[in-house]
Image: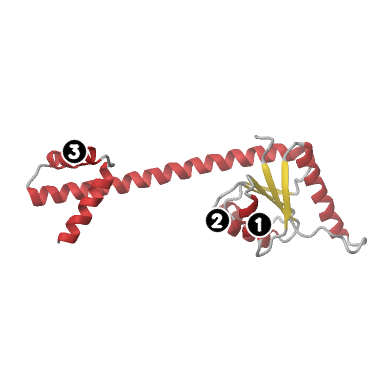
Amino acid sequence: MNQALRIVVVAPDLAVADPEDEHALQQAERARALHIGLLENNFNLVATLPADVFLSERIAQLQPDLIIVDAESDARDALEHVVLATRDARRPIVLFTNDEDRALVKDAVAAGVSAYIVAGLSTQRIRPILDVALARFQHEQALRAELADARTALRERKTIDRAKGLLMQRQGLSEQAAYEKLRKSAMDKGLKLGDVAQRMLDAMELLG
């Protein structure tokens, strides 16, 4: 993993107003452990942000490589904000929480969380957790790209077949002759075969 990885942490306000508030003290201690772990592993902690309506804008400005959600109890709300903030530019998301709600685990995985860690925030575990999260995210992105390419190829194949069919019907060509005509037109115009086929379909539709 690149040591210059830019990281944004999404976490609640860590100010402890009441020194007797054990829950708030535990949250503050978790946040300190996280920050120490990131610094010890030479990660670039860009900012710590609250999960609010301005999160999308702030993430867009900061352009982090990875987002860590540190949510002791409000994990679902925090996660919803982060998912909305990254829907147009996907990034690996790591969620640290003590929330053991199984429904939340399913929702988090479906939303694209790369690592869901329950009660596992320790400085020693941070690097391997982020390494695995980043590797998983990159693998999923590669699969998404492959699926998108396959869908594009299928659409293009269908477009070419339709164009061939029209040429065969209107010009009395064989399937091979129709294909060769499309291919020659694509070569002459310096275009992809699918683009030429689509243009031909558009023109024939206009002419009726």
Which sits earlier in the primary sequence, circle 3 or circle 2? 2
Residue 206, label in figure: none
Count of marks overlaid on the render:
3
Q: Which residue is mark 2?
A: 87
Amino acid at circle 1: Arg
Q: CA distance from mark 2 to mark 1?
A: 14 Å
Q: Which mark is residue 184?
A: 3
Q: Residue furthest left?
A: 172
- Residue at 87 percent across and 56 percent down: it is 25
Depth check: give the residue in front, 176 or 116: 176
Cβ atoms under marks 3 and 2 closer than 8 Å? no
Gap in Å between the C-alphas at discs 3 and 2? 42 Å
Mark 2 residue crowding within 10 angstroms, few (<14) / some (14–19) / many (20+): few
Where does residue 171 sit, x and y in percent of width and height?
Answer: 8, 48
Residue at image x 65%, y 37%? 131
Pick whichever of labels 3 and 1 is earlier in the sequence: 1
Which element carries disc 2, helix, strand or loop?
loop
The answer to whether residue 142 is visible is: yes
116 vs 154, left or right, is: right
Q: Which residue is mark 1?
A: 58
Disc number lying in front (3 or 2)? 3
194 or 139, nearer to the observer: 194
